[in-house]
Structure formats: C-alpha cells, structure tokens
Amino acid sequence: MDSNIAIDIKNVSQSFKSGFWLKEKKILKNISFSVKKNTVFGFIGPNGAGKTTLIHLLVGARKPKSGGIKICGQNIIKDEAKKNLGYLPEQPDFYKHLTGSGFLYQMGILSGLSSKQTQTRMDKVLKLVHLKDAKNLELKKYSKGMLQRIGIAQSLLHDPEVLILDEPMSGLDPIGRKELREMMGILKQEGKTLFFSTHIISDIEAVCDQVGVIYGGEMKNVGPIGSFLSQGSLETEVAFAAEARDLSKIKTYKNFISIQGGYRIVLKGQKEVNSLLGELLENNITVLWVTPIRSSLESFFE
Amino acid sequence: MKETMNKQSLLKLHAVARVTFLEILKDKILYSAGIVSLFLFVFTFFISKLSVVSVDRVILDFGMSVINLSMSFIALFFGATLISREFERKTVYLILSRPMSWSSFLFGKFLGLIYILFLEGVLFSLFLILMLSFFKIPISSMLGFALMGIFFQSFILAGMALFFNTFTTTSLSVVFGLFFYFFGNNVSQIRLFIAKLESDSLGSILSGFVYIIPNFESLSWKTNILYQIGPEWSRVMITLLYSLSLIFTLILAASFISKRKN
C-alpha cells in the first residue's frame, strides 16, 4: 500500500433494514477512493446522498456490509487506526452538563491519553480554537460556533494525522465559516489530512485540494478541484464603454446588458469573443474587461 | 504492556461512568423523585399513627418500600434513556470513533447509573435509620441485608432497562421494565395461580414464564427483618451470585445486540 495514502476506501457497500417488513435499503453502493496525506478532501453531495453513513463507517462507529477502510494503512476496526483519527460529528450536541475542559478531559481519556497528557494537550488545542477563556463554562452556555470549535478541539486532542469533519460549516454565521476555513488552513500547514463533508459548494471551492461527489449512494466523481472547475463549457464575459447610439455599429450581437458607463455580454466559445473584440476595436470602442467565467461544482447536480 | 492496557481500559470505563453519573446528577427528574420519596417518608409517620399494627413494623415496612420504589423508578427511568439519549445527540458515534468497544461503553454507562443508585440508596437508608432512631425503634443488623436486596433489585432493573433500550424506544423500555418488575415481585403468586390452574398447557407456559423472569422475591428480606428471622447465608450468597450473573448477562446481551445493529 502507498504510504502516502491517509484514507483508503475499497468497495464499500452499506445497507439498512427499515420499515415493518425490514426491507433492505442500499445506502452506499460499492464505493472506492483514496485520499492522499496532507490534503483537504471535500466530500460533497445533496442531503440523503449517503455522506454521513460513509463517515460513520470511516470513523469505525459502524461496520460496512462489505468492503474495507484503512486509515494510514491500518484497518479501521483496529484501535491503532482510531488513534490516528479525529472526528467531528454533524451538528454536535455534546454533554451539555460538562464544562469545556471537562468534556475535553473525557475525550482525551477515551482517546487513550493519560490524565497528564490530556491536560497538556488540552491547553494547546484550546488555544488553537480560541476557547481558553471559556474552558470553565458549561457547554450549554456555548454558542453554536463555540460548540463547533470545542468539537474541533476534541478531534485534535490526541494529535491525529487524519481529521474527519461532518458538515463542519453547517449552522455557522459568515464570520464562523471564515474562522473555520482559516483553522482548516492552519491544520493543513501542520501536516494534517482533512476530510470534510458538506452540501455547500462554495466551502469546497474555498479550501479543498481534492473533491469527491456522492449522489444516490454512488461516487460520481473524485479528483483534484481544478479538474472539476475546468469541466463544462467555458463562457467569457466581455464589457465595453459605449453610448446607446454606438450599439448600432455592432452587427454580430444585439443582446447587450446595460451597465454603468457601458454594456456587457456573455459569450460561448473563443470564436465569438474574437469576432466581438474585432468589431469593438474597429469602431474605436473601449474594452473594459474580458473575463472567463469559471464553471461551478454546482453544475454536477444540475 | 498488558498492565498499561488494563489501566487504560479502567480509566476509559470510569470516564464514561463519571459523565453518566454527572449527567443524571444534574437531572431535575432525579430531584423530583427524591422529593416525592421524602414526602412518602414523612407520610410513613402519619400512617403509623393510624395503623393498628405496631408503629415499629409500619415504619420499617413502609420506609423500605419507599426506598424500593424510588430506586426502582430511578433505575427504570434513567436506564431506559441511557443509550437512546446518546444516539439522539450523536455522541455515541463520537465515542465509538475512539478506541473503545461497545461492551466497554455500555458497561461504563451502566456503572454511572449504579453510582447514582448507590448514592440515592445510601442517602435514603441513612434517612430511614435516622427515622428509626428518632422513634427509638431498635435497628437490627438484618436491616443491612434487606437494604442490600433492594439495592440489587434496582441494579437488575437498571440492567434490564439498558438491555431493552438497545433495541426499542425509551417508553417501551420502561413498559417492559415495569412488566418484569411487577411479575418479578409476584413470582410466588404466579406459582400459586399455576397450581390452581386446570389447564396443563397454560400451566406449562406460565411455568416457563416464571423461569424467564427475574425472581425479585428472592431478593426481598423485608419479612426476615420484620419477624427478626436471620437469613440463611447460603441463600444470601446464591441470590447475590444470581443477581450478579443476571446483570452480567444483560449487559453482554445488550452489547451483542448493539454490535449486531451497528
């Protein structure tokens, strides 16, 4: 096995029995992919696509019906693999009666740290998530953003190589999202591998190196974010400074959109762009900008 | 190496038990149950005044019944929410993502509830002893046996509620627990009923049922204390072994079901 692989998922399938007749429902269908070390992997899919189910398998909280999962080369059912893994559940509702430090202490002990090691690490992670002043506050008094941050703190407590975050941005305000993105950047710089799920595409575009798209329990695509963004038809926006009377000089196109001090138009294909630019220059019309429009990950779900 | 692992496992077990203990300790339902029980204790005094039987006997009988009811309620109610609550707030996935097995987790949760039951039982027992001293009723060493029986009954009920909660809802777990509590405390009555039955097939079914349900009557040493009859040591030992093995079996079964479900 490649030592540069942090997460290796091979032919994983999962199904649940539900309803009165315990009818089997397939949730995940033969999923295989891997995540390289020290990358940020965005796992995207609409609600009900199977993201959380796969994450529960990834963290070893459930066993897959078939297939196998390895974390840093170790089978997830082994304790050694779990020691290399930090996990933040979706919209966590932690033990509200505990204080921030009490909760971290419990998670440290459950992660296999000694009491002394837990205390030392606790100070470090609380500083990282900016919760040092709130450590003696009960979790029921924490805001949503603070809960998310203490959740990240507990996932980092045992200094794992791989972090699995289930919808970490959900429910956060713009400032909270920005802080979390920055924190993810810091963790990547520290050499961690981050795997996070979301159904919000802009989050993925902002922080990920690699993207995996899941839909209906099947992996539709896995690859570098660049390859996703370069897919689809490339459109270009051309804007120019002109009066209304100047528009009659342009023969090839008519549907211009008025902007302050000029007009703009979105064109498909390089040939159309060249033709319009030629006419504008011929008529001494000032070109304001020529901007290619990036295709979005959103197109995968359209 | 093995010693470190064992120490680490004990630390983890204690960590789960501690959080469970603190969570229940901060639950208002626990205090409501405590206040109701204290009212019932005070009520004992008035009952004893109205009764034609000796005051000593009424206070002892009623007092122990209050401890029994209160501990059984706490065991059933909190036992039936131990696991479902962890699933509701998704903390179960967080804990299982750590190097911890289902059986250790369940045992830790159970232990946390046992700490609460023990604390509650000790406080109420002290209260009963204070009441007995106040009314100048002689305290026999038999009281210890009777209270121990009540403690073990509540521990079994907690194990049962936890077991039911691994495969059914909280309310159904309480209903199942109450069912076994009621029939478990009336085993001799069921046996009497079987003896009077004319139908053999129904008798066989009921006899089988008597073997399945836990015999809580065997844990009741209230009669011994009321009539000052010392319990047989062999019976005490067998009953305690029976209780411990029943609790152990329930936790193991709960762990097996949880693993299968996940």
Image (cartoon, grey):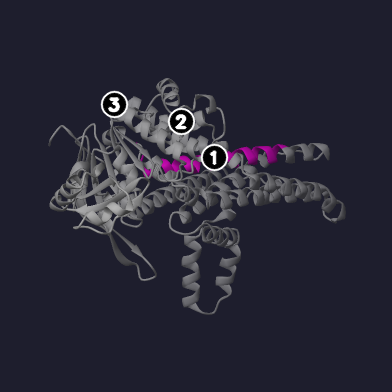
Q: Which label sits on residue A104? A: 2
Task: Check disc 3 and report the residue beneath it.
Answer: A189
- Asked if disc 1 and disc 3 are in contact, CB closer than 8 Å, the reply is no
Q: Which residue type does callout 1 highlight?
A: Lys
Q: Estimate the x, y position of residue B237 in percent, counting from the top left.
A: 52, 43
**Magenta-tinted stretch:** B99-126
Q: In which quarter of the image is the C terminus of chain A?
A: bottom left
Residues packed near mark 1 inside 10 Å, few (<14), some (14 to 19) or many (20 plus): some
- SS under mark 2: helix
Task: Check disc 1 and report the residue beneath it.
Answer: A96
- SS under mark 1: loop
Q: Is residue A249 rendered magenta in the image?
A: no
Subunit of label 1 = A
Q: Quadrant of the N terminus of chain A?
A: top left
Q: Are marks 1 and 2 on the same chain?
A: yes
Residue B139 found in image quarter? top right
Q: How far apart are marks 1 and 3 (CA)?
A: 32 Å
Q: How far apart are marks 2 and 3 (CA)?
A: 24 Å
Q: How far apart are marks 1 and 2 (CA)?
A: 12 Å
Subunit of label 2 = A
Image point (59%, 71%), residue name: B193
Image point (42%, 51%), residue name: B254
Q: A160 or B123: which is nearer to us? A: A160
